[in-house]
Image (cartoon, rainbow, N blue to C red):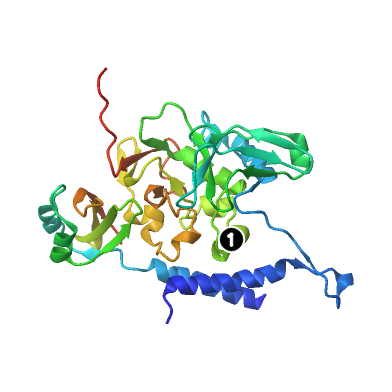
Amino acid sequence: MNARLFLCAALLAGCATQNAAPPGAQVALGRLQQTVVAGQTTKAQLLAAFGPTKNVRFDSGFEAWVYQSPGGAGQFSEFVVLLDPSGVVSKTRTRAPSPP
Amino acid sequence: MMPPSIAGVVAGAAMSAVLMAAAVNVPAHAAGQNTVTVKSTRDPVDKSYRKMIRGMERFERERAFAPHATLRFQLLPRLPNVDMTGITLRVAGDTVSVPVPVDENNFFVLPRNAQALQQDAAVLASRKTASMTWRARIETPGLPAGTRRLGDLRLECRVGKEAGLVSNSSPLFGWISDALDSPEGVCTSPDGNYLFFAERPIFAVTLRAGERAETLPFSMLYAGGEQTPDMLPFCDCQVLLDRTYYVPLWDASWPDDTLVEFTYMVDAPARVAP
């Protein structure tokens, strides 16, 4: 039983470590909103301007990239960019500030 | 040092080995003998009829979450190249076989059959093991296009877990599913992680209740955005990752009538006037 409990604790600790990954590069919201234009901005331009950030790539070729923008009082806005399969921004959205 | 995801898989495998050993029945009278009896496990894509009926009974008991809704089940792709057209389904026991009609969107309603229940029948689909996953689908009629209702999703989670529908395949997920994931634990906890699938690839999900509206964080889309390529094959979201989302089932500040609104990656084509 002790061995089982130990393995269980180790397993849960592993999950917790993975979930603690940084949620994305921190960039001022104004800079993101001025720089990133749907239908124009490319993946290469995003990388050049802001560096790599947290992203998810899908089988369809689309990618979702997320940036965090400090919003004061320890809160962050999320700025999410959708890249189409050709590597051009197709949509953006901003989520209101919330605690990390 | 191994990456956490690999470490998780190894830990899961080790855990699975311990549990498999624990699942082996060694009768007292057989101590010292070499013969053991191993409890069989069902093929992951073939579901227990009894468990699915238990899910239907839970739907009836907890209709307060979705008083006007109907319950169906749905088959969804689990592997990249599975053909999701023309699927046939049947309830199969020792001597009974009941065909189950599946519609063009792979929805079906499970019939009640006392003989199949008594024989602990399986619900079998005409596709290979682990090529599909299953979900309950509970829908209140008359909702706006591109929305779901939170109470419907709350009940879907409870019915889906009761019915044993999730088809994750690794020892890690399987062990958690068997030993830790009660419907109450999964559907009432912020760590419950019950995955829902939208109709199309999503870009945003927003909750709306009266004047209150809140867009879900990125971490509640795409299976949390934490699925690495080496882990993805173990998740039943493998080929549906861009349709995957969590909702705060546990958060009572959002009433059951809350609308869950989807913004899709690609907008629907505008309707052309006749």
Q: How many marks?
A: 1
Q: Which quadrant of the structure image shows residue B254? A: top left
Residue plotted at (40% across, 29% down): B143
Residue extending furthest toward the left = A34
Residue extending furthest toward the right = B29
Kind of residue at badge 1: Gly
Left or right? Give the position of B266 relative to B135.
Answer: left
Residue B47 pos. (x, y %): 64, 47
Above or below: residue B39 compared with residue B49: below
Pick the residue in front: B234 or A79: B234
Above or below: residue B248 compared with residue B262: below
Left or right? Give the position of B63 relative to A42.
Answer: right
Residue plotted at (63% across, 48% down): B46
Q: Secondary structure at mark 1?
A: helix
Residue plotted at (60% across, 71% down): B15
Locate the C terminus of chain B by quadrant: top left
Residue A24 pos. (x, y %): 27, 64
Left or right? Give the position of B154 relative to B61.
Answer: left
Task: Say if residue A13 shows up in the picture.
Answer: no
Pick the residue in front: B203 or B269: B269
Q: Which quadrant of the structure image shows residue B222? A: bottom left
Locate the N terminus of chain B by quadrant: bottom left
Pick the residue in front: B265 or B163: B265
Task: Say if residue A33 shows up in the picture.
Answer: yes
Pick the residue in front: B40 or B128: B128
Residue plotted at (43% across, 45% down): B197
Residue B41 pos. (x, y %): 68, 57
The numbered mark 1 sits on a residue in which chain? B
Residue B219 pos. (x, y %): 35, 57
Query: Residue at label 1?
Result: B174
